[in-house]
Image: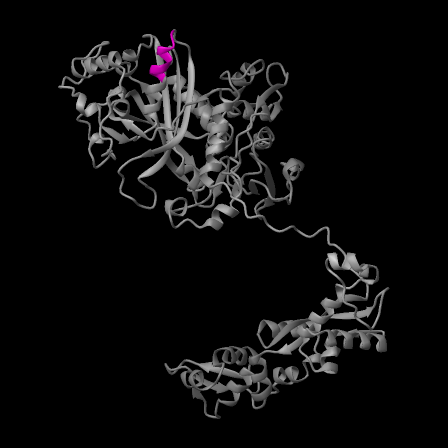
Amino acid sequence: MTSELAENILHQVEKNGEVNSLDLVNVFNEDHQKIIGAIKSLQTLDNVIEVEQINHKKWEPTAEGEHVIQHGSHEAAVYHAVPENGILQTEIMNSVPYAKVGFSKAIVAGWIKLDKSSGKPMVTRNVSTIEDTTQNNLKNFDNLTDNIKLEYKKRKLLQENIIKSVTVRKGSNFSIKIEKQEADLTSDLLVNGAWKGKKFKPYNFDAMGSALDVGHLHPLLKVRAEFRKIFLEMGFMEMPTNNFVESSFWNFDALFQPQQHPARDAHDTFFISEPKYTKNFPQAYLEKVKQVHSKGGYGSEGYRYDWKIEEAQKNLLRTHTTAVSARMLYKLMQEGEFKPVRYFSIDRVFRNETLDATHLAEFHQVEGVVADYNLTLGDLIGTLYEFFKKLGIDKLEFKPAYNPYTEPSMEIFCFHEGLGKWIEIGNSGIFRPEMLLPMGLPEKVNVIAWGLSLERPTMIKYKLNNIRDLVGPKVDLRMVYNNPICRLEKVSNKNSFKVNGSHDDNSIVINSTKNNQCLQGQSYVIFCDPKYPIYWFESLLSLAENCFTSSVSTHLHSSVLNPSEDLKNFCNKFRTNEKTDISIIFIWKSIGIDPLLKASGMREIFGEINIARFFNRLIESVNKSLLKYESNGTKYANKIDMVLEKMHLSMHKENNYKLNDLRSKSKTRYVLGDLSIIDVMLEAQR
């Protein structure tokens, strides 16, 4: 854009009062974009011009529409291609442009007809003359109504274009002469006093500053910081892990791992060639370790082999940070009397792995260790639940496993909502007495420990499928730059709500956890007979309000006449058009006493009792403390099933069991001690 063009625009504004940028194209014979560029440069001046954006809609024929204007509509072309005595359909389709569209339009218009009686489809004229309305309309499309234009737009014969332009008017400081404004106050302007007669460009204090060339935390470091914060919140102390090179003694022998174990093979471990050996060991402790390996002790028979000091002296790149845990427990007992401790570490370990999309030879291990009197497997499981709960993971399963230095040992699995399956995330166990007692720990002291990788949760958090995208020479630095800080979706236990109608109608507070990610978008259809409405359903949804949001809509089947007021007001509280976690459609239909539930991708659930079980499990999957069922164990679930079956038989009058027995039992307490689906159903039937 030249200043000459800008000045010419100002002269046009001076002459006409206001001008449109599209009109200036014809005046100056310039491209519209150049005109816009010149106007934008004038906008940088202080109120010299005022600019208004104008959007103009313009209808134009498409390339196909131009074809219709020149040669007639597709249906007319098909009609004119049919001779008096008819023609085969295949010949029409092969000889006429746009024959497929034209043929169907001509059939609908009644211009032609198709005869298949001879075995070969024959096309003949159905009228003697036609009027090509489509061609005539397109020739004069400016006079068409909007509805007709939209119809031709659907046929891709017309298109609506939006033409953007600007209208330029005089500003409060309008001038036809452009004076260059100074951008900087230089020393020359100050020395000569020339700044007094100059105009300066205004400062834009809202403009973003220049991006500084600074470093950014790698996603691994972001997740590591979050893990470290969780350990510190739980009262753990961080272990020093700055020694990547470790001796086989601390890495294997001190952990009661035999010297012939496959992990000591060069195919699994990186051994150091220089220095190859180390001889700096606590001799008294080394002798105890040798004794328990070769001859046994502390109630163990040991491995009964010839333990060699040469194997223990070999240096290697540590294969786990548990070697550091062993050092710390030994150091603890060297300081004097035992005291309960909690240790954690997050650092690199090295294994001679085959490289693939999920494995590297170098990775990070996250380890937690708790030492105290009389710790049990229950303490380990409870600690793991608390630890992973802070990570936002509340669905855990444990599988028995084998580790040389822990007994019992468990692999840890969690349900990954995004993948929709259970995945292994770590390992855990209780350190063996053969490892702890030679260090001098008291016999009643147990040590629970667990470990997991840092890379796998980071890949899940940042949605990476290949570990090479996370570490290594192929890492995209823009990924490091652009990724946000790590914020784990932690579970909160602060929400609570009240459930009425129990303990002599006194309200009790039940903690709830709103974790409805797995429910979002689920929908269910329930067919229910209006003679047997399931009134307890509204109570159930009210109970679960703080767990997930619900919407209910009801519809009448043609078999239902004159619905009662109860049906009209059924679940009125949950009638909403807003998006909710689950939606339920009730269809009142004469189907008998047993309702039917259907859901996409799921088999049908038949019967009121089975539907109650289903929604009990649904609520329990979000909040285990709300409606007790399977979370209380198989014996408790079996008791609920037995009562539900009795309720089912009573509803169908197959025996003399009375629901009143249960109602009277639940006046002062829950039927089975905890709030269950039984209590909700009984309360609704009172």
Q: Which residues are magenta?
A: 329-336
The colour scheme is: one colour
- Examine the structure image and report whether residue 332 is included in the region drawn in magenta: yes
Q: Where 40 falls versus 129 (above or below)?
A: above
Determine if residue 421 is in view: yes
Where is residue 232? Give x, y as percent: 49, 24
Residue drawn at (48%, 87%), measured in percent from left and top?
124
Q: Is residue 438 left or right of residue 496?
A: left
Which quadrant of the rendered structure holds the C terminus?
Answer: top right
Query: Is 607 drawn above or below residue 46 in the view shown?
Result: above
Indicate left or right for 630 with 47 as reference: left
Q: Tell me, yes or no, if residue 609 can be seen here.
A: no
Q: Is residue 580 magenta?
A: no
Residue 636 or residue 545, whichever sits in front: 545
Looking at the picture, tell me which residue is in the foreground, 121 or 408.
408
Asked if 425 appears above or below 43 in the picture, the reply is above
Extreme residue toward the left, this view: 306
Q: Residue at x 56, y 28 (%)?
A: 492
Give the main secondary structure of the magenta stretch: helix
Q: Residue 557: image x %, image y %?
A: 57, 47
Quarter of the image for residue 529 reads top right
- The spot of residue 348 in percent (x, y) is 37, 33
- Tell me if residue 72 comes above or below residue 436 in the rendering: below
Q: Quadrant of the N terminus?
A: bottom right
